[in-house]
Amino acid sequence: MSDTTDTGAGTAAETAGGATSSAPSRRSLLGWGGAGLALGAAAAGGAVAAVRGDGGDAVPAADSGAAVPFYGVHQAGIATAVQDRLHFAAFDVTTKDRGELIRLLKEWTAAAARMTAGQTVGEGAYGGLAEAPPDDTGEALGLKPSRLTLTIGFGPSLFAKGRFGLEGKRPEALLDIEKFPGDNLDPARSDGDLCVQACADDPQVAVHAIRNLARIGMGRTAIRWSQLGFGKTSSTTPDAQTPRNMMGFKDGTRNISGTDTAALDKHVWVGEKDGSPWMTGGSYLVARRIRMHIETWDRTGLQEQEDVFGRDKGEGAPVGKAKERDEPFLKAMKPNAHVRLAHPDSNGGATILRRGYSFTDGTDGLGRLEAGLFFIAYQRDVRKGFLPVQRSLARNKDALNEYIQHVSSAIFAVPPGVRDKDDWWGRALFS
Ligand SMILES: C=CC1=C(C)c2cc3[nH]c(cc4nc(cc5[nH]c(cc1n2)c(C)c5CCC(=O)O)C(CCC(=O)O)=C4C)c(C)c3C=C
Ligand SMILES: [Fe+2]
């Protein structure tokens, strides 16, 4: 655990860069494969043979074992290619000391830079003082970087008066989300001062990352709730096969593509003139745990299932069309079909980037599968993204509502990317 050092930006930078560390890395354990080469470049802070051009514009990662660059204009994990697994954690900040919080964010940044490059945290998992717990918990030793991305967000409660002096910096877009008809929200699984979204192609790598951040944060933060996810339910790579959700339908067909920079600028990235300068290049994240009434769905006829979405189950084509990517003709769908109500044309152009994951947490004690969608949406302004779409789905009685229930809700301001080794998560907010 790296709580032994007062990690100033300089120290954090050295650690993040990896150049001065003698810690055993997942790279050194792996040798120099193709992924290792990309990782080596990332660790050196140089041009990466890889996944993003200028650190902001995303292009798909080819190799699921590779490293996704940590530094960039935008945080990775939003427009970058979606990985297979998720561990999402919301934290309460337990320290009252602003300086402590800043130190924590610097330490987290340094650890995140190392872990996303496939390296161990701090001095590693072994080889240190026998009396002290190792800096790294060790379960990712020998594993590839697995396209791990770590994306941080700040919740509304962090900006509360009398806490950290941030009340004047709360963006208007970081609003308190209203309760929608049909919501059955569990406060213990909702909200949070901070969040970290960890996505990777190996679940052990994602879980290791959250575990180590939680460990570094001990005494200053505590996990409020967390969510594991599998089977991505969206795609930010248009050429990839669209994944299917737990209802068996292709999900993510009409998502914003990670390569469509014009759409990302228009709908996802916060602009300079959007009101909160520290958020320029960032985005707003809405997370909703949505339980599915799986057993009811499984007893529902195919025609009804297809009517619910307005797409067919096999190909994923919109009603009356042959191919998944054909332009939907909304009026051909039932008035309360999910796609019809969620489409930008039905919501004044409101458009979101979806990045959700399926989940199952076993059974619920009544023999029913505790399963659903952990819905994640990124947008430039929640008032022009999630809110109008969800209002439309809730108030117009989306046909899907009979089969689902929203059981948790959270919103976070996701700051821009960490530019280089001297930068840290939230620097613009606290400066
Ligand atoms: C508030 C936003 C949305 C919530 C909540 C939501 C829940 C939800 N969606 C599905 C399954 C599908 N959704 C699909 C399309 C779709 N959904 C939203 C928004 C929300 N969905 C949008 C904006 C769209 C795209 C509409 C369009 O432009 O055509 C689809 C169709 C395939 C696709 O385009 O992705 C499916 C399937 C579930 C199961 C669910 C809650 C559990
Ligand atoms: Fe949807």
Image (cartoon, rainbow, N blue to C red):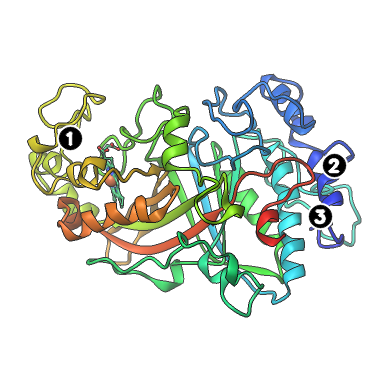
**Residue depicted at 87% across the width and 41% down the height:** 21
Answer yes or no: do the residues labelled 3 and 1 have beta carbons within 8 Å? Answer: no
- Name the secondary structure under disc 2: loop
Quadrant of the image containing the C terminus: bottom right
Mark 3 lies on residue: 134
**Residue depicted at 57% across the width and 24% down the height:** 63
- Name the secondary structure under disc 1: loop
Mark 2 lies on residue: 23
Image quadrant of ligand 1 equals top left
Q: Judge the density around disc 1: few (<14), some (14-19), many (≥20) Cα neighbours within 10 Å.
A: many
Regarding residue 258, the answer to whether it shows in the image is: no
Q: Nearer the viewer, residue 349 or 367?
A: 349
Quadrant in the picture for residue 76: top right
Quadrant of the image containing the N terminus: bottom right
- Name the secondary structure under disc 3: loop
Q: Nearer the viewer, residue 126 or 380?
A: 380
Answer with mark 3 or mark 2, whichever residue precedes in sequence: 2
Mark 1 lies on residue: 311
Regarding residue 25, the answer to whether it shows in the image is: yes
Answer with mark 3 or mark 1, whichever residue precedes in sequence: 3
